[in-house]
Amino acid sequence: MSSGLRRALRSLLRPGACAGALLFVFLAQVAGCREDGTGPPSPSPQAVGGLVFTEGDTLIFDAYGLDPYGYAIAASHTTPLWRIYDVGGTFAGAGNVTSVADYPDPGTSPALSDTLRFRFLPSGDIYQYGFIAGVVERREGVHLVPAWDRIAALSLPSNTMWAVGTVDTLGTDTLRGTVTGDQGYFIAVLNGVRTAFHGYGVSLSSIDIAYSIVVSDVPPAVLLVREESSQLSNGFLRYLTSMKKH
């Protein structure tokens, strides 16, 4: 198993994260097959293509809040759901926009949703509208003008860094992204069948913000999002458990 995958899933192995430990067992079994030569080779980051979704696709995640030390809080467990409701649209001056209804926990009532908008480019790059503005407003209560933020630049070689945007009103603190590349295999249920998803990752960091994002292009999915805790705010962990693709 790659060292990057171990880093991405470190919190799942901490006390109180039983579901994560079970996920790790599945991952270890699949990655072990790859490492002894019986599985597929690890593609390079440059092999990542664009994520292609269709209307009606759904992704269900396990999610946990993290305490100030980065440990998963068992009592905070929710099962957020993403529903793709529009692809190829236009928004905020951009085309090729995928719109997602984000339901924080469908088991609660009423089931309120947020709207997320992405651009999944054929190169593997991913833009999210208002990513920085949303993080800063939630964590600090400071309003920034939303923009199309490139949250993944998988068209770049591993360990390459790019500037995502500024995360303060003075423009002095820059959120930077780094391609972490091959993150090994993740297990989730796709259309009722347990499936191995090959993950590719990026890290986003500034003075007070640190994110890990892992995606797969075949089949296309967002596999893991982790926001590290800081002095300003506790973080969270979200990882894919099942998906229905039309």
Image (cartoon, rainbow, N blue to C red):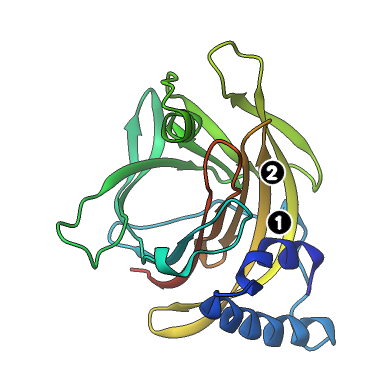
Residue 188, disc: none
Q: Residue 20: in sight, yes or no?
A: yes
Residue named by callout 2: 155
Q: Nearer the viewer, residue 9 or 121?
A: 9
Query: For the view shown, which residue lies furthest in the left direction?
Result: 110
Tag 2 secondary structure: loop
Q: Nearer the viewer, residue 132 or 179?
A: 132
Q: Are marks 2 and 1 in contact (CB under 8 Å)?
A: no
Q: Number of callouts in the render?
A: 2
The structure residue drawn at horizontal position 25% and vertical position 64%, both measured from the top left corner, is: 106
In the rendered image, the quadrant that contains the C terminus is bottom left
In the rendered image, the quadrant that contains the N terminus is bottom right
Q: Residue 154: in sight, yes or no?
A: no
Three-letter amino acid code at the position of disc 1: Ala
3 left or right of 167 in image: right
124 left or right of 146 in image: right
The structure residue drawn at horizontal position 51% and vertical position 31%, both measured from the top left corner, is: 132
198 left or right of 225 in image: right
Q: Position of residue 194 (x, y in %)?
A: 49, 85
Looking at the image, is 218 positioned above or below residue 188?
above
Few, some or many C-alpha atoms within 10 Å of disc 1 (few <14, some 14-19, many ≥20)? few
2 or 1: tag closer to the N-terminus: 1
Residue named by callout 1: 47
